Image (cartoon, rainbow, N blue to C red):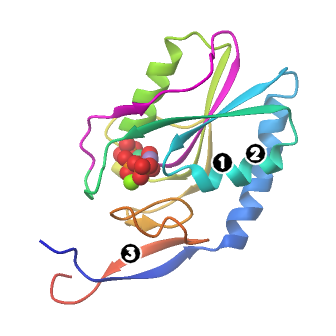
Amino acid sequence: MPKPDYAIDEMISAKAIAARIEALAREIRGEFRDTGQLIVVGLLRGSFVFIADLVRELDLPVEVDFLEASSYGNSMESSREVRILKDLRGEIGGRDVLVVEDIVDTGHTLARVTEYLATRAPARLRTIALLDKPARREVDFKADWTGFEIPDEFVVGYGIDYAQRNRNLPFIGKVRFTGDDA
Ligand code: PRP
Ligand code: MN
Ligand code: MG
């Protein structure tokens, strides 16, 4: 079945995102001031834009690593089975780790990933998500820092895809379905 037609309405502007990231970076700098070298872990693919902007505001000695987890694939619904498709390159035992995510929706992805990383006994394991959709939560999970709480809308842009498209939009947009299928 072909994907329905849709339009995208801006929900959070690039400017508002940048301002929020500056404030979040200040808080994170406070928390990790005493850390020798923080490992910032981006969850691929969705977090690639957010992590790029966040680390440039951090002004701390950081290492950047990535882990690929996927639960949605091309579907609009969570499979609830989070697969680790690519593991970290570095060791995190005894180190301070900040996991960076684009959005917490049902919560399955970050809950599963943090449980998985915790088995390696990092010194501190913290999480940050740019967006949080609490209305959709299925497992009890809250990121340590959240950029914006949003209503239950299908969002794209700033790293977030709909069927692998629209990740390159510089803002967060809301998908509005149009045409006969809407
Ligand atoms: C999306 C998004 C989060 C996750 C959030 O990833 O980037 O990682 O879903 O949903 P949840 O809280 O319901 O688990 P997706 O599985 O689409 O992979 P992607 O990052 O490669 O797009
Ligand atoms: Mn993702
Ligand atoms: Mg996705």
* Helix, strand or loop under label 2: helix
Residue 140 in sight in this render: no
Q: Is residue 164 left or right of residue 49?
A: left
Question: Magenta segment: does it hold 77?
Answer: no
Q: Which residue is mark 3?
A: 175
- In which quadrant is the C terminus drawn? bottom left
- The disc placed on residue 51 is 1
Question: Magenta segment: does it hold 88?
Answer: yes
Q: Is residue 114 left or right of residue 163?
A: right
Q: Earlier in the sequence, mark 2 or mark 3?
A: 2
The answer to whether mark 1 and mark 2 are in CB contact below 8 A is: yes
**Residue furthest to the bottom:** 179
Residue 115 in sight in this render: yes
Q: Is residue 32 above or below residue 27?
A: above
**Disc 1 versus disc 3: distance between alpha carbons?**
23 Å
- The disc placed on residue 55 is 2
Q: Is residue 81 above or below residue 106?
A: above
Q: Position of residue 150 (x, y in %)?
A: 49, 61
Rendered residue at 38%/62% (across/down):
164
Rendered residue at 16%/82% (across/down):
181
Q: Residues in magenta?
A: 78-105
Question: Quarter-wise, where is residue 17 in the image?
Answer: bottom right
Who is closer to the viewer here, 53 or 174?
A: 53
